[in-house]
Image (cartoon, rainbow, N blue to C red):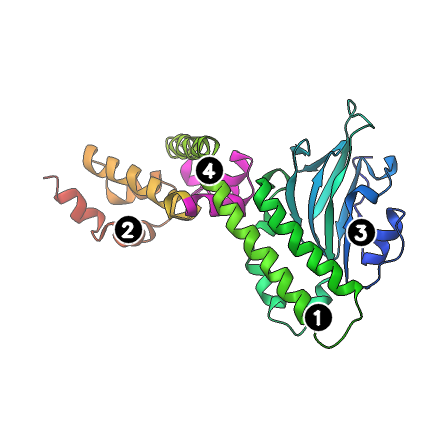
Amino acid sequence: MENQSPIRLKTISEFHKSRGLAQPEHPLISVIDFGTIPRSADIRGKSWIFDFYQVSLKRGIDFKMKYGQQAYDFDEGVLGFIAPNQVFKIEHEPHATQNQIRSGWMLLVHPDFFWNTPLAKAIKQYEYFDYAINEALFLSEKEEATLNAIIENIRQEYHANIDKFSKQIIISQIETLLSYSERFYHRQFLTREKSNHQVLHRLEELLNHYFDQEDLISRGLPSVQYVADQLHISQKYLSTLLKVLTGQSTQQHIHNKLIDKAKEKLSTTNLSISEIAYALGFEHSQSFSKLFKSKTDLSPIEFRQSFN
């Protein structure tokens, strides 16, 4: 089962059919009442890829969704985002009860629906579509009510008689939904202070350990992807979290730690600039010197001289 290729659903109609639902009223957009989707065991343990966007608010779920090695259960209502071509998996939950009351909604939108509108490009600016499943958005009751009202507006608009204004009204509602979601994510970064500062602490420990190794020349500088993988967080989520909490990107944190280590070696050892550059993972000392000066306004030699 683990080695099976992901199942790709190309259209929203295929999704409806796979879940035992009636055909959608519009081929490119659908709002589904999650409580009306029949329970199905055959969707579990399989990997899926959609060719369309999915935004979903779900409660009372009796399964886990898995992204990489991380699993997330829906014991509470959370908002999740899946972009086209992302692979995700639905895991069986052995202790789940069939008596859970399921509720919520799913908004499915094919990229073709955005054609010839500003949202065709703008939707890519919402980084949370690249967050992992376990980095979903926890909503307060007030926030949930706000999004529920927008979804109801979208549902009513495409159920009504379609006219020349319908598409733009729906696009406007989706833009509003995405903007609110971005606001709520930033609120979450700030209010979940303990868990987020634990990430900062783990990042600090990770970078300290990395730059203390003796084989940096063979390993090179740590990449953003490496750091995110070690912290079990997606690149985009880590980047946004750091920007909100510290105003700096992951790459800037890596460079800052590198400069701290360089300053330590410049001020406490007699190693040459080339030896320090090599020890910190640079193949060429010129690259090290250029980065050091861009961060400190001093060349490595000038910095060292300031201690003499």
Answer with left or right where residue 186 lies relative to residue 124: left
Q: Is residue 237 above or below residue 287?
A: above
Quadrant of the snapshot with the N terminus: top right
Which residue corresponds to mark 2? 295
Q: Where residue 206 appears, x then y in whole percent?
A: 43, 32
- Secondary structure of the magenta portion, mostly? helix
- What distance separates the C-alpha of mark 1 from that of mark 2? 49 Å
Q: Where residue 198 appears, x then y in whole percent?
A: 45, 30
- What distance separates the C-alpha of mark 2 from that of mark 4? 31 Å
Q: Nearer the viewer, mark 3 or mark 4?
A: 4
Mark 3 or 4, nearer chain start:
3
Which residue corresponds to mark 1? 167
| Residue at (50% x, 41% y) in the render | 188
Which residue corresponds to mark 4? 191
- What distance separates the C-alpha of mark 4 from that of mark 1? 36 Å
Type of residue at label 1?
Lys
Which residue corresponds to mark 3? 8
Give the crowd class for mark 1: few <14, some 14-19, many >=20 residues within 10 Å. Answer: some
